[in-house]
Image (tube, rainbow, N blue to C red):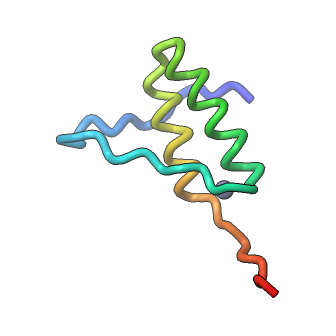
């Protein structure tokens, strides 16, 4: 899925801490991988985008027995 225009948070005075992928979450794993690839090629916009997605998607808590 190619993304065209994404808002860039230029107003941020400092970079927000990056979200950590949640263990066992396929979405987090995929986003973390894409983020790593984006960072490797210097695509900061995509790195930010993946961080936002990682924060936004909801985790369905499974009852721990
Ligand atoms: Zn997740």
> Which residue is most to the bottom?
65
> Which residue is most to the front?
65
The residue lying at 53 percent from left, 12 percent from top is 41
State the count of labels. 0
The residue lying at 46 percent from left, 15 percent from top is 42
The residue lying at 64 percent from left, 30 percent from top is 34
Q: What is the x, y in percent for residue 3?
A: 63, 28
Q: Please tell me which residue lies in front, 26 or 46.
A: 26
Is 39 situated above or below 8? above
Q: Please tell me which residue lies in front, 6 or 38.
A: 38
The residue lying at 52 percent from left, 38 percent from top is 49
Is 15 situated above or below 38? below
Ligand 1 resides in the quarter of the picture at bottom right
Is 48 situated above or below 22? above
Q: What is the x, y in percent for residue 16?
A: 32, 46
Q: Please tell me which residue lies in front, 63 or 10.
A: 63
Q: Quadrant of residue 38?
A: top right
Q: What is the x, y in percent for residue 27?
A: 72, 49
Check the picture and name the quadrant holding the N terminus. Answer: top right
> Which residue is most to the left?
13
**Left or right, 13 with reference to 18:** left
> Which residue is most to the right?
65
Q: What is the x, y in percent for residue 15?
A: 29, 40
Q: Please tell me which residue lies in front, 14 or 64.
A: 64
**Left or right, 11 with reference to 20:** left
Q: Quadrant of residue 65?
A: bottom right
């Amino acid at each position: 899925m190619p993304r065209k225009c994404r808002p860039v948070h230029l107003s941020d005075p400092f970079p927000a801490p990056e979200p950590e992928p949640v263990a066992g979450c396929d979405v987090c794993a995929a986003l973390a991988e894409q983020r790593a690839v984006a960072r490797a090629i210097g695509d900061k916009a995509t790195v930010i985008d993946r961080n936002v997605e990682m924060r936004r998607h909801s985790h369905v808590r499974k009852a721990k027995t």
